[in-house]
Amino acid sequence: MTTPGIDVPDARGRTGLDQAGRDLTGNPDVVIRDVELLATAWHVLRRTTYDYRNRAGHWTREQRETYDRGDGATILLYDPQRRTVLLTRQFRYPAYVNGHPDGMLVEAAAGLLDDDEPAGAIRREAAEELGVTVGELQEVFKVWMSPGSVTERLHFYAAPYSPADRNGAGGGVAAEGEDIESLELPFDEALKWIEDGRIADAKTIMLLQWAALHGPLPTPPR
């Protein structure tokens, strides 16, 4: 019997998807026993069985499901002269189905790396989503956003922009179903949107708070 994604290509041409993690040796308290492929419709869902030695020295057998969508990158675009930030607004079904009133989230531009390195990927996303040509990048941090189940590590960047840098249409890639609105906000207003819940996206909150505490748009003490 053949299984798409294992010994024959899946819809995206991938094979060997059940091999991820089998060769991990960095933690002597974790021994990988099996990796099952559960779904490959677009990204990859796996169930891994492993033996784990706890702090008391006892071994237990455990299973975890991991969702592998690849790594991503995000960017805070800020205008230091006008003290504004350039964000996106788009529909997010997972938020909508989990209680967000309309699913329209205000976010920093972001996307998956695909086959690009992080800096190139975020330049691509800024151009596609916001129509901005990004100059010099500042790398802020690298973060696992949901390490209990999602493998993705997100690369955070910041970069200045000016009205002259907004030289593209933006809006996202229509062929991929993207319908992205650009949203320019005064920085202090964006911080207020965190407080009242109008900005509720984790990566965006992290970048805005970084900018206020340590970054290019410090907020005076109250």
Image (cartoon, rainbow, N blue to C red):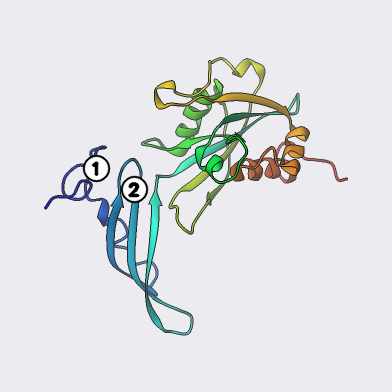
CA neighbours of label 2 inside 10 A, class few (<14), some (14 to 19), many (20+): some
Q: Residue at x 64, y 45 (%)?
A: 206
Quadrant (top left/top right/bottom left/bottom right) for the C terminus = top right
The amino acid on which the numbered mark 1 sits, given as a three-letter code, is: Arg
* Side (left or right) of 46 relative to 169: left
Could you say which is closer to the camera, residue 60 or residue 102?
102
Residue 205 location, x and y as percent?
66, 43
Say which mark, if any, is on residue 179. none
The amino acid on which the numbered mark 2 sits, given as a three-letter code, is: Val
* Side (left or right) of 188 relative to 152: right
Q: How many marks?
A: 2
Could you say which is closer to the camera, residue 198 or residue 12?
198
Q: Could you tell me if the residues under marks 1 and 2 are in contact, i.e. CB atoms within 8 Å?
A: yes
Residue 170 location, x and y as percent?
53, 20
Which residue of the protein is positioned furthest toward the right in this rendering? 222
Q: Which residue is mark 2?
A: 44
Q: CA distance from mark 1 to mark 2?
A: 10 Å
Q: Callout 1: helix, strand or loop?
A: loop
- Does residue 107 show up? no
